[in-house]
Every structure is written in structure tokens, then in C-alpha cells.
Image: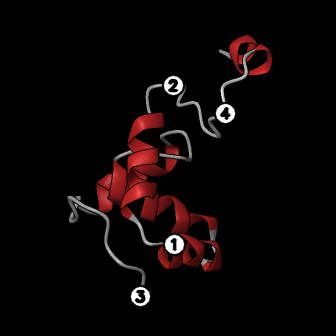
Amino acid sequence: MIRYVIESHDPRLRFPVGPDALSFLGWRGALSDEDWVGLSGLVRDADYFERVLLDTGVDPAGNMFGKRLQRNRRRRFASPRPLR
């Protein structure tokens, strides 16, 4: 894929690669621009990791955070929720 991106004249900005790519891009597409930018205002990494895991099922912390979170909480949201 890297070679294709470098050598092709494909104008796309994003090339989904990996088992979680489409899920993550779908999540981004479901958020408003304001909510997406608001994610950068989360102070702790753990808050961001929790939000991504709850909304997408993808654990950006490499499963360590997800296992701990799943022990303490049930997945409550089936779709993206607005930021508070």
C-alpha cells in the first residue's frame, strides 16, 4: 500500500489500512466537525481512549486500556454520542 500511495497519482487523502481503519473512519464521519475538534480538548489520554473504545469498539491503547475498562463498565453506547 505504501508503494501504491507514493507512486500513484491517486488524489485521496486517506487510504484505510488495517483491521480497524474502516471502523475508525466511519466513527469520524459520524461526528460533527465541532465534536471532532472537541476531542482534542480532552485533557487525559485515558478520556480519549475511553471515548474511542465506547464509540467504535477499537482500543487505541492496544487492548490494555480496553480490558480494564470492560471489567469496570458495560458498553453503553452503540453509536457515537455528542461531547459534553
Q: How many angstroms separate mark 1 from mark 3 (CA)?
A: 14 Å
Q: How many angstroms separate mark 4 from mark 3 (CA)?
A: 36 Å
| Chain-order first, disc 1 or disc 3 | 1
> Badge 3 is on which residue?
84
> Badge 4 is on which residue?
11
**Residue 78 in sight from this viewpoint:** yes
Amino acid at pointer 1: Asp
Write down the quadrant of residue 32 in the picture. bottom left
* Residue 6 placement, left or right of 30: right
Looking at the image, which residue sits at the far bottom? 84
Residue 75 or residue 33, whichever sits in front? 33
> In the rendered image of this protein, does residue 8 appear above or below residue 13?
above
Helix, strand or loop at mark 4:
loop
Q: Nearer the viewer, mark 4 or mark 1?
A: 4
Q: How many angstroms separate mark 2 from mark 4 (CA)?
A: 20 Å
Counting from the top left corner in percent of width and height, residue 57 is at: 34, 47
Helix, strand or loop at mark 2:
loop
Quadrant including the C terminus: bottom left
Please state the total of marks drawn on the protein image: 4
> In the rendered image of this protein, does residue 30 appear above or below residue 9?
below
Which numbered circle lies on residue 33?
A: 1
Which numbered circle lies on residue 18?
A: 2
Counting from the top left corner in percent of width and height, residue 2 is at: 72, 17
Q: Is there a contact, CB below 8 Å, between mark 2 and mark 1?
A: no
Q: Residues within 10 Å of mark 2 (few under 14, many from 20)?
A: few
Q: How many angstroms separate mark 3 from mark 2 (CA)?
A: 30 Å
Which numbered circle lies on residue 63?
A: none
**Residue 69 in sight from this viewpoint:** no
Write down the quadrant of residue 77 in the picture. bottom left
